[in-house]
Image (tube, rainbow, N blue to C red):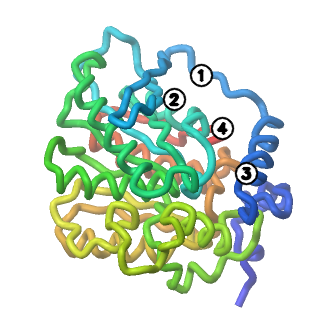
């Protein structure tokens, strides 16, 4: 059987090879945060498209925390808009909402919709249920502020990548069960949804240049305060545990065949379909976790973005023509 490295798409290989060994070593989380911050600081600073208005908002939660949200919006005169509520990745322990600035801005520009990103608190300082409750509070704020943004409440999607995709899937379950508002769509990019780490693909990725088995175990243990794989884990924290996935918003799930989340993502898509939830599943040959960031201009990543943007446009801005191959530098 070919090795992990040998199976990487040829256009993605240079970015993988350029990634330092140990880039995704989470054995010391504070050190990993500092190391990844230094790596990010070495790249070019992202400049927002001039036609997109970017604003920060702060919402006071019941525990006194000031929840930070960032909106990316078309011109203020636009009304009757669709919206995407977005959660960044980072294995539940890394990054803040600025990590998804480029993607959120490009979605707002290409789809002519409002995007709002949430800076949920991360583990281990803030374990479950704080992150998903932060996400719920931010979504409640967005529904409440819909008129201010010119948003049609029937066209509000939720989405995220990796840990953010897991939070989006958990948020869909939480919104369904609480019944206060109803997102119309789920954009789930290689979502982190299974705390058990027992699938075949969860054992496959060992390279510490990408999100790997050791990092995943550490991330889940931090998020669940050492309870990962136990009997008392909420479905909102680990959506793969949900027995009932009916009455959820339609979804698109996208993942590479070299991603340790491959099996759990395929299984979740199958379960959504079996429950009558309209679902697209896209698996990309030769793609590893997070390859979009290093190879935004590759044919594979362009196709991936086009698939996601197209599905999202159909859900929240039907009839809108997106760029044929949108790119998102540093996202």
Q: Nearer the viewer, mark 4 or mark 3?
A: 3
- Rendered image quadrant of residue 82: top left
Element type at marker 3?
helix
Name the residue located 31 percent from the left edge and 37 percent from the top edge: 139
Image quadrant for the C terminus?
top right
Q: Secondary structure at mark 1?
A: loop
Residue 105, numbered circle: 2
Q: Are marks 1 and 4 in contact (CB under 8 Å)?
A: no
Give the numbered dot on residue 30: 3
What is the distance, in whole Å, between disc 1 and disc 3 at their CAs?
29 Å
Q: Secondary structure at mark 4?
A: loop
Q: Where is residue 240 shown, x and y percent of the image?
A: 36, 72
Mark 1 or mark 4, earlier in chain? 1
Residue at the farthest bottom position? 1
Mark closer to the chain start, 4 or 3: 3
State whether residue 135 is above or below residue 301. Answer: above
Q: CA distance from mark 1 to mark 4?
A: 11 Å
Q: Which mark is residue 48?
A: 1
Relative to 125, is 320 above or below?
above
Distance between the alpha carbons at the discs numbered 3 and 2? 29 Å
The residue lying furthest to the front in this view is 63
Nearer the camera: disc 1 or disc 3: 3
- Disc 4 marks which residue? 329
- Report the side of 111 relative to 1 (left or right): left
Callouts 1 and 3 close, C-beta under 8 Å: no
Asked if labels 1 and 2 touch by Cβ distance under 8 angstroms, the answer is yes
């Amino acid at each position: 059987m070919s090795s992990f490295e040998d199976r990487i798409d040829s256009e993605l290989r240079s970015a993988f090879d350029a990634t330092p060994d140990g880039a995704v070593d989470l054995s010391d989380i504070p050190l990993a945060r500092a190391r990844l911050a230094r790596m990010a600081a070495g790249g070019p600073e992202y400049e927002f498209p001039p036609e997109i208005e970017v604003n920060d908002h702060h919402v006071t939660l019941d525990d006194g925390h000031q929840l930070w949200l960032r909106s990316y919006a078309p011109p203020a005169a636009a009304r009757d808009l669709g919206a995407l509520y977005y959660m960044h990745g980072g294995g539940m322990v890394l990054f803040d909402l600025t990590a998804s600035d480029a993607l959120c801005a490009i979605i707002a520009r290409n789809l002519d919709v409002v995007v709002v990103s949430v800076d949920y608190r991360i583990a281990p300082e803030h374990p479950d249920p704080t992150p998903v409750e932060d996400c719920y509070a931010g979504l409640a704020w967005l529904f409440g502020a819909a008129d201010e943004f010119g948003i049609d409440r029937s066209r509000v999607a939720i989405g995220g990548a990796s840990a953010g995709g897991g939070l989006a899937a958990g948020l869909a379950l939480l919104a369904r069960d609480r019944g206060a508002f109803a997102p119309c769509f789920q954009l789930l990019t290689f979502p982190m949804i299974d705390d058990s780490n027992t699938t075949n693909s969860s054992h496959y990725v060992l390279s510490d240049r990408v999100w790997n088995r050791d990092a995943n175990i550490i991330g889940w243990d931090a998020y669940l305060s050492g309870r990962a794989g136990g009997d008392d884990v909420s479905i909102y924290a680990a959506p793969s545990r949900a027995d009932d996935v009916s009455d959820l918003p339609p979804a698109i799930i996208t993942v590479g065949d070299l991603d340790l989340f491959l099996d759990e993502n395929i299984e979740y898509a199958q379960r959504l379909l079996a429950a009558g939830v309209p679902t697209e599943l896209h698996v990309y040959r030769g793609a590893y976790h997070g390859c979009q960031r290093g190879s935004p201009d590759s044919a594979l990543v362009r196709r991936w973005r086009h698939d996601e943007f197209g599905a999202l446009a159909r859900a929240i801005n039907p009839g809108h023509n997106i760029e044929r191959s949108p790119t998102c530098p540093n996202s």
